[in-house]
Amino acid sequence: MSSLDALRARVAEHPSNAWARERGWDPLIVGTERARVLILSQAPGRLAQASGIAFDDPSGRLLRSWMGVTDEEFWNPDLVAVLPMDAYFPGKGTSGDKPPRRDFADRWHPMFLERFADVRLRIVIGGYAQRRYLGSSDVTANVRAAETFLPMYPIVHPSPLARGWRTRNPWFVEEKVPQLRLLVRDAIGRE
């Protein structure tokens, strides 16, 4: 068992996650110590949690398109790791999913980040992850200035609920998506 597998097991067994264990859910934290790209995201969606596969939903299809990777590349844990702000689907809210639990990232992220030592690019998705890792949840401002945060690269959440944002900000697809694809290819392609 790798140190990441052991850490995932600790997450699953922690008393704060008993409710998820009762549902038969595993923590959706993906990757090996060799991963080159790390996705810091909100929390798994309902469909991904049900399948047990991170980003196995419409958001994931769009994210893979933006990254310019195949399904095989995306789900290769030696290439792409996923560390959400909460490892479990938080439930439905009034508009979209409920926010991730506030204490999850504080407790677990430092230990996981130590083990993702070969990561070359961190894709920071959405306001929750951007607040933690960039100090601001202003997604528009963060994404506009994405290259200034390298090796972290903030993007808008690929959720269907963010379609309006993408419509109002066509520069994201025109300018930032091609840049993201180059960064991803460089991170996973070089030795």
Image (cartoon, rainbow, N blue to C red):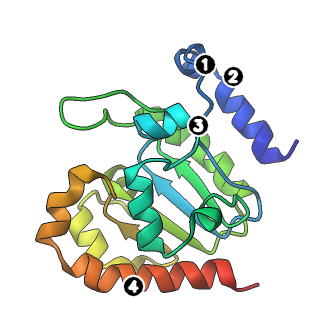
Which image quadrant: the N terminus?
A: top right
Q: Residues within 10 Å of mark 4 (few under 14, many from 20)?
A: some
User: Where residue 136 appears, x then y in whole percent?
Assistant: 30, 60
Seen as rendered, the residue at the extreme right is 1
Instruction: Identify whether 53 is placed above or below 98.
Output: below
Query: Residue 178's mark?
Result: 4
User: Where residue 71 appears, x then y in whole percent?
Assistant: 57, 62
CB contact under 8 Å: marks 1 and 2: yes
* Point 42% across, 63% down: residue: 63
Mark closest to the chain's N terminus, 1 or 3: 1
Residue, disc 3: 52
**Element carrying mark 4:** helix
Q: Horizontally, is 133 left or right of 5 in the view?
A: left
Along the line of sight, which residue is nearer the eye, 72 or 120?
72
Q: CA distance from mark 3 to mark 2?
A: 17 Å
The quadrant in which residue 53 appears is top right
Instruction: Identify whether 78 is placed above or below 181.
Output: above
What kind of residue is marked 3? Answer: Gly
Mark 3 or 2: in front is 3
Q: CA distance from mark 1 to mark 2?
A: 8 Å
Residue, disc 2: 13
The quadrant in which residue 45 appears is top left
CB contact under 8 Å: marks 4 and 1: no
Q: Horizontally, is 9 left or right of 44 in the view?
A: right
Mark closest to the chain's N terminus, 1 or 2: 2
User: Where residue 133 appears, x then y in whole percent?
Assistant: 44, 59
What kind of residue is marked 1? Answer: Arg
Residue, disc 1: 21
